[in-house]
Image: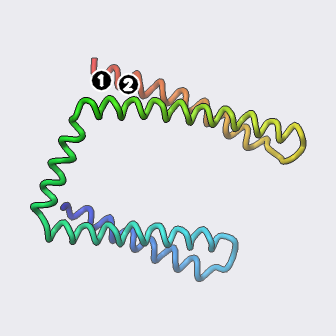
Amino acid sequence: MKASNLIYGVICTILAGISLYISVSFDNDMSGIFSGMTGAFGMMGITAIIRYFYWRKNPEKYQEKIELEEIELKDELKQKLRDRAGKYTYWVSMSITALSIIVYSLLGVLNIMETEHIVMYLGIYLIIQVFAGSIIFYHLLRKYD
């Protein structure tokens, strides 16, 4: 187990403490967000620290785990399935974004809620997804050709 994992856990725990201090010190609308960040950072930090010390006590099990993970990563069938899952996830997120644009546009037209900024954000997000997907695909294609 790398020492960087322990450092990561300590940093997350420190950030949890800072978030807790801000949450308790300032009594406003943002204190709820900082309370949530306290829980998130705290759990990530504590989990990372516990894992570090657990794997330090069991190096044989850790080595087996690493070897199994390497085998799983190099398995061709699982690579193809991960690629296919990524493709389908990309399509689903694009569809949900496009559907959200339509729904929020209808809500804006019917004067149910102010949706100008939401529709603009979703439109920009959709365009970024399309371009990012294409750029990443061509970058990987060029890398492996």
Tell me: residue 98, above or below residue 58. Answer: above
Name of the residue lying farthest toward the top: 145
User: From the image, which quarter does the C terminus lie in?
Assistant: top left
What amino acid is labelled 1 in the image?
Answer: Lys
Could you say which is closer to the camera, residue 122 or residue 107? 107
Mark 2 near mark 1, Cβ–Cβ under 8 Å?
yes
Secondary structure type for disc 2: helix
Where residue 45 sits: x, y (%)?
A: 37, 69
Tell me: residue 46, above or below residue 84. Answer: below
Secondary structure type for disc 1: helix
Name of the residue lying farthest toward the left: 60
- Residue depicted at 39% across the width and 66% down the height: 44
**Picture quadrant where residue 64 is located:** bottom left
Q: Is residue 43 left or right of residue 128?
A: left
Where residue 91 sits: x, y (%)?
A: 53, 30
Where residue 141 sits: x, y (%)?
A: 34, 21
Q: Is residue 15 left or right of residue 3?
A: right
User: From the image, which quarter does the N terminus lie in?
Assistant: bottom left
- Characterize the local packing of mark 1: few (<14), some (14-19) or many (20 or more) Cα atoms within 10 angstroms: few
Q: How many marks are shown on the rendered structure?
A: 2
- Residue depicted at 45% across the width and 25% down the height: 135
- Characterize the local packing of mark 2: few (<14), some (14-19) or many (20 or more) Cα atoms within 10 angstroms: few
**Picture quadrant where residue 127 is located:** top right
Question: Disc 2 designates what residue?
Answer: 139
Could you say which is closer to the camera, residue 26 or residue 130? 130
Label 2 to label 1: alpha-carbon separation? 6 Å
What amino acid is labelled 2 in the image?
Answer: His
Where residue 38 sits: x, y (%)?
A: 50, 72
Tell me: residue 40, above or below residue 114. Answer: below
Question: Which numbered circle lies on residue 72?
Answer: none
Question: Disc 1 designates what residue?
Answer: 143
